[in-house]
């Protein structure tokens, strides 16, 4: 499924938080969104998920205006994993993941063993099956994050939007979640602060002060000059002698 943004704009309290953002994410592509704190990544992801309406411009899903789609239809094809999603309800991990099936349920299509299997598979994918019956408030930050990713996977989306999905995870779970996301045959837009992780995306886009100022293959976009000008750090780019991949070594603040 193709996800497009056409000249998106959003203003709050006189500040232009998204400024003329245009983007085409191809079916099956993994697109990384990078940029300093406050550059607009979350604002853009929420708009791509249909949770925030643009003040100008449009989001298109396979060429169809999202503004003309019902929320339920959007939820049947697009899932968002938010950065700070939380719940105060007394629910188990499995119940949170089961919420991912909501867009598909109706009086004519009640909960079935197929839904149960999708939920179990999603819990397995994030290594949370063994904690499925734990209450939400007893889970650690990283465990909650994995449950939220499982909820999005249980939605079986064609477009998956992830807002810094690895920020609470230990290194093993970071690597396994990123590998899982890359292997999914769906369209993915993922906001990342770890620029070395962003190197594994098909393309990256750089946000700066609400604008998408550059996009392309990570090796072409994440240059020493870009790191200097947009991220305010001096860095060296070195080639890993084992596999030739590009690694960033951050040195000092500009
Ligand atoms: N509803 C709002 N009203 C006013 N300002 C807002 C609102 N929502 C977000 N902002 C501001 O918009 C800017 C962009 O925020 P956003 O969360 O999109 O950035 P981000 O790139 O995701 O940042 P981070 O890397 O810190 O998560 C920030 O300066 C934020 O304070």
Image (cartoon, helix red, strand yellow):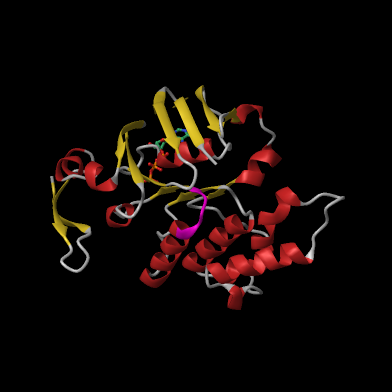
Q: Position of residue 155 (x, y in %)?
A: 64, 54
The residue at the point 43 percent across, 68 percent down is 176
Left or right of residue 44, residue 85 in this image: right
User: Quick check: which quadrant has ligand 1?
Assistant: top left
Find residue 73 and report its horizontal and vertical position in percent. 68, 40
Q: Nearer the viewer, residue 239 or 22?
A: 239
The quadrant of the rendering that contains the N terminus is top right
Relative to 223, 18 lies left or right: right
Residue 177 x %, y %: 45, 63
Up the image or down, 220 lies above or below 112; here it is: above
Q: Nearer the viewer, residue 84 or 114?
A: 114
Indicate whether 4 appears above or below 57: below
Asked if residue 91 shows in the view, the reply is no
Instruction: From the top left corner, tell me how far across and down residue 25 is, in percent.
Output: 45, 39
| Residue at the image position 50 percent from the left and 52 percent from the top | 84
* Extent of the magenta region: 183-187
Magenta highlight on residue 53:
no
Q: How many tags in the picture?
A: 0
Considering the image in quadrants, where does the C terminus appear?
A: top left
């Amino acid at each position: 499924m193709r996800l497009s943004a056409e000249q998106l704009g959003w203003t709050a309290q006189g500040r232009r938080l998204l400024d003329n953002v245009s983007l085409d994410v191809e079916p099956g592509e993994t697109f990384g969104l990078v940029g300093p704190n406050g550059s607009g990544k979350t604002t853009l992801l929420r708009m791509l998920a249909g949770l925030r309406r643009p003040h100008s411009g449009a989001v298109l899903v396979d060429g169809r205006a999202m503004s003309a789609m019902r929320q339920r239809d959007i939820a049947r094809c697009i899932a968002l994993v938010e950065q700070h999603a939380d719940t105060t309800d007394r629910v188990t991990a499995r119940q949170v993941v089961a919420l991912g099936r909501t867009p598909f349920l109706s009086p004519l299509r009640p909960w079935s063993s197929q839904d149960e299997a999708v939920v179990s598979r999603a819990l397995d994918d994030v290594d949370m099956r063994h904690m499925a019956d734990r209450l939400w408030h007893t889970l650690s930050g990283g465990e909650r994050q994995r449950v939220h990713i499982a909820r999005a996977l249980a939605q079986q989306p064609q477009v998956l939007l992830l807002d810094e999905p690895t920020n609470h995870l230990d290194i093993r779970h970071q690597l396994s979640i990123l590998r899982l996301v890359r292997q999914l045959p769906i369209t993915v837009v993922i906001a990342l602060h770890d620029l070395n992780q962003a190197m594994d995306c098909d393309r990256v886009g750089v946000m700066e002060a609400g604008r998408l100022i550059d996009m392309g293959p990570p090796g072409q976009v994440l240059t020493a000059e870009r790191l200097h000008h947009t991220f305010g750090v001096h860095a060296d780019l070195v080639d890993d002698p084992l596999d030739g991949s590009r690694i960033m070594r951050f040195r000092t603040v500009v």
